[in-house]
Image (spheres, rainbow, N blue to C red):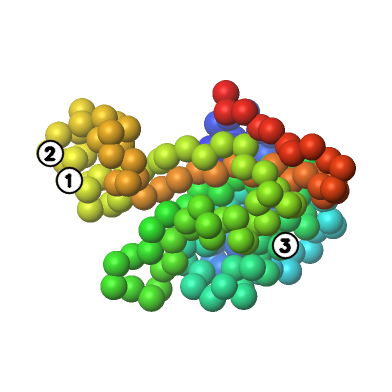
Amino acid sequence: MLTFLKLGFRAANLTGVDINSARIHQGRMDLPGIDLRCETADRMSFASGSFDIVFESTMFVQLTDERVAGSIALEMLRVTKPGGHLVLVDWRYSKPGSRDYLGMSTSRIAKLFDVGGTTQVVVSENGALVPPIGRRISQYCSPLYFPVQKLFPFMVGQRTTVLKKRSHLPGKNDRPLRIEKR
């Protein structure tokens, strides 16, 4: 929420949900004026098409049950206005040797959010390097962080993907939607 406030969004225009009541309580203390609700992301209390932008950060990587992840993705799509955007900031890779994390790969995003049908990818940008590498580079040779990020994209663990929800579903007479990266 702080990022949105820093970008100039008004607190009265921001809404957040979390299943953890302690985080909601703390958020209400720290961020007055923002509508924060304790509810599950797979059954939100908002009307369909309520939001221009729906944002998630580091949630899907923690969801290893694809039924739950699918329900949340459908709910995110439901509350997004036609022509609105979904912003996904998540980790691309699963944690090696762990069943507690499932990376948000391009194919997983496509499946969960019906890319090419209900949504189209507007842009996908690399973020942080995978933590073990990113921490070491930051600690011992921080000027190399961004060159490594550019030269070795497979070392990038975090990715931001922006999806646009179609205003209508494509029909057989529609031309393919072309979105160019700026």
Residue 43 sits above or below residue 120 on the image:
below
Cα distance in 3D space between marks 3 and 1: 38 Å
Residue 75 seen: yes
Residue type (three-letter) at the residue carrying disc 2: Tyr
Residue 12 seen: no
Q: Secondary structure at mark 2?
A: helix
Please report the residue visible at 51 percent of the width from the left and 48 percent of the height from the top. 89
Residue 155: x %, y % from top left: 29, 46
Mark 2 closeness class: few <14, some 14–19, many ≥20 residues within 10 Å: few
Check residue 140 in the rendering and tell me which mark sits there, or answer none.
Answer: 2
Say which label, 3 or 1, has the lower sequence index: 3
Is 88 situated left or right of 140 in this image?
right
Q: Which residue is mark 3?
A: 75
Is 145 situated left or right of 169 in this image?
left
Q: Secondary structure at mark 3?
A: helix
Is 69 situated left or right of 43 in this image?
left
Marks 1 & 2, CB-CB < 8 Å contact = yes
Residue 99: x %, y % from top left: 38, 76
- Quarter of the image containing the C terminus? top right
Marks 3 & 1, CB-CB < 8 Å contact = no
Residue type (three-letter) at the residue carrying disc 1: Arg
User: Along the line of sight, which residue is nearer the eye, 46 or 114?
Assistant: 114
